[in-house]
């Protein structure tokens, strides 16, 4: 299986609150958090990890620090560390929907879709009607191969954010897995129109043509994909010459 994960990180500065921090440790923790965020944004991941861990040590009750620490661990592909940090953030701020969503993202990348789905559902309960949370919920259902539920959730997400190509890609995949190929093609074409250089959108369109046994359209789309990602183009060729249909787990997103 091919994993096309896009990571969108939101790291949080704390500025005005420095003056109102209750203790010297709190003030120093905020300063270190901001330093770690700046290091992260410059790509200095090892330094950011060290700085944010120091911030968490001297100011352990600040959930923002733990959220940022989780993101650095995730970027370093340390999913165990990322999970521990975000659970600490949730313990300190249990009604924070974005943290529950972040936990779900980590669990889905760790290939624990049932637990990820639970986190996304909690996030949705805390903040109903958020398109990103609904997108991730739908993606968790796709991983669990519950394509009917995935379709229902992703259609809600599309209604909230119709210009979001990631939603269109995931919805197109869920339609394709239910053999609703005309609907799948429409979603993939729309995603490719919104973001013509999005290799996931272009690959999905080719995948759908392969799945519906439209060889001419698949070959034409393979040429388009080859200009963006030769490896994906080769995978389409392999699929055309095989009885096996590729399953492409979709991306998950922070917010």
Image (spheres, grey):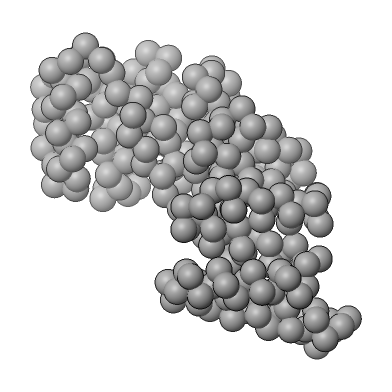
- Residue 47 position, x and y percent, is 51, 75
Is 238 left, or right, of 247 in this rendering? left
- Residue 250 position, x and y percent, is 42, 36
- Residue 156 position, x and y percent, is 59, 33
Q: Quadrant of residue 31?
A: bottom right
Q: Residue at x 46, y 52 (%)?
A: 77
Quarter of the figure with the N terminus: top left
* Res 77 seen here: yes
Up/down of 172 relative to 134, above or below: above
Q: Looking at the picture, tell me which residue is in the foreground, 34 or 236.
A: 34
Total numbered labels: 0
Quarter of the figure with the C terminus: bottom right
- Residue 168 position, x and y percent, is 43, 36
Up/down of 162 relative to 85, above or below: above
Q: Residue furthest right?
A: 22
Q: Residue at x 18, y 40 (%)?
A: 231
Q: Residue at x 56, y 52 (%)?
A: 254
Q: Looking at the picture, tell me which residue is in the foreground, 173 or 112.
A: 112
Q: Residue at x 71, y 65 (%)?
A: 64
């Amino acid at each position: 299986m091919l994993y096309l994960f896009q990571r969108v990180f939101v790291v949080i500065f704390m500025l005005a609150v420095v003056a109102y921090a209750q203790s010297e440790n709190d003030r120093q923790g905020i300063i270190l958090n901001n330093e770690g965020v700046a290091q992260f944004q410059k790509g200095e991941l090892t330094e950011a990890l060290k700085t944010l861990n120091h911030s968490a040590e001297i100011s352990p009750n600040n959930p923002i620090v733990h959220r940022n620490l989780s993101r650095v661990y995730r970027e370093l592909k340390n999913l165990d560390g990322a999970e521990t940090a975000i659970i600490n953030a949730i313990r300190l701020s249990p009604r924070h929907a974005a943290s529950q969503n972040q936990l779900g993202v980590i669990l889905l990348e760790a290939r624990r879709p049932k637990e990820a789905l639970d986190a996304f559902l909690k996030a949705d309960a805390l903040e109903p009607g958020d398109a990103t949370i609904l997108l991730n919920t739908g993606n968790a259902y796709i991983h669990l191969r519950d394509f009917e539920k995935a379709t229902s959730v992703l259609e809600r997400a599309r209604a909230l954010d119709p210009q979001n190509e990631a939603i269109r890609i995931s919805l197109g995949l869920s339609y394709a897995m239910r053999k609703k190929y005309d609907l799948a093609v429409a979603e993939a074409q729309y995603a490719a129109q919104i973001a013509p250089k999005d290799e996931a959108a272009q690959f999905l369109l080719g995948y759908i043509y392969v799945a519906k046994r439209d060889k001419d359209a698949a070959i034409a789309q393979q040429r388009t994909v080859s200009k963006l990602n030769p490896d994906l183009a080769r995978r389409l060729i392999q699929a055309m010459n095989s009885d096996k249909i590729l399953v492409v787990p979709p991306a998950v997103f922070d917010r």
